[in-house]
Amino acid sequence: MKYRGFEITACPDNGIERYNRAESRDELCNGFFCGVYPASDEQYANQLDTFCLAEGYEISDTTDASLVDGVIKYVDEHYYELSESKNEVKQKRTEELLGILVCWLGETESGAELYDTLFNTIGMADEEIREIGFTSLAPFFDRERYAQTIADRLIESGTENTRSGSWVVHYENISERFGVNLKTDEELRDMVGRYLYDRSDAVADFNLESDKVTLDFFYSHCPYVYKRSMQEEAEQGEKELLAAEDVDACHNMDEQQTMIL
């Protein structure tokens, strides 16, 4: 049956488990096993949810009228969750179709022509073009923005993964991800350096070497380093406190011995 934009299927089920509170035991019931799909999914390829309607629990009996009432009640109670799932399926389908379209374009166009189609005709941003795999089109990207994107990614990955506050990335890895060669492209390397310098809130120091970039971050931007340093400080503080207590205890003992003498 169709209801509120969903297609709900149902088949008889004689093994639905429910807990009988009156008798304090589990029991197997007759009823229906139901599946929920987008109403437009004629192939039933995208199941959104499943649920059971047990006789004596969700429905009074196994008639068609009770089945319809039970389905309507379930969909009404879970409408927003089901709608979210349906939207996710729709978004995924849109992305799949876009991927097919882009792959087709990649086979029929290349270079500046392909970039013009993706950027100007379809309206994709440089970052979106890169994310779908066309790093070969990096030479056509806005270099200033792309340099900022690279710098931001270096900072993000570094601060999220470092355990010491330092991070090293070889240019080969940057090339694989962004389709650029910072080893030979001095202009772009300098641009990345300027954006790293501008992020002095997170970057304490950096060095663009011949084959890699090394970065040192402030601990406040490195969650794992910060947590570890806090723990170490707490442990050190506890040790110092215990040591001070031992010293006080020794002084007290000396004073007591002096009084006895």
Image (spheres, rainbow, N blue to C red):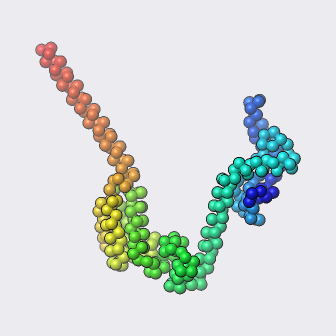
Residue 125: image location, x then y, percent: 50, 74
In this image, 229 relative to 21: left or right? left
The residue most toward the right is 63
Residue 56: image location, x then y, percent: 81, 39
Residue 195, by quadrant, is bottom left
Residue at the spot 37% in from the left edge and 66% down from the top edge: 169
The residue most toward the top is 260
In this image, 87 relative to 222: left or right? right
Residue at the spot 39% in from the left edge and 72% down from the top edge: 147
Task: Let me know if residue 13 appears in the view.
Answer: no
Q: Quadrant of the C terminus?
A: top left
Task: Let me know if residue 61 appears in the view.
Answer: yes
Residue 257: image location, x then y, percent: 16, 18
Residue at the spot 80% in from the left edge and 53% down from the top edge: 10
Residue at the spot 66% in from the left edge and 64% down from the top edge: 90
Count of residue discs:
0
Q: Quadrant of the N terminus?
A: bottom right
Tell me: residue 83, above or below residue 170: above
The residue most toward the left is 261
In this image, 45 relative to 106: left or right? right
Residue 193: image location, x then y, percent: 33, 70
Q: Nearer the viewer, residue 66 or 170?
A: 66
Tell me: residue 111, above or below residue 58: below
Residue 191, by quadrant, is bottom left
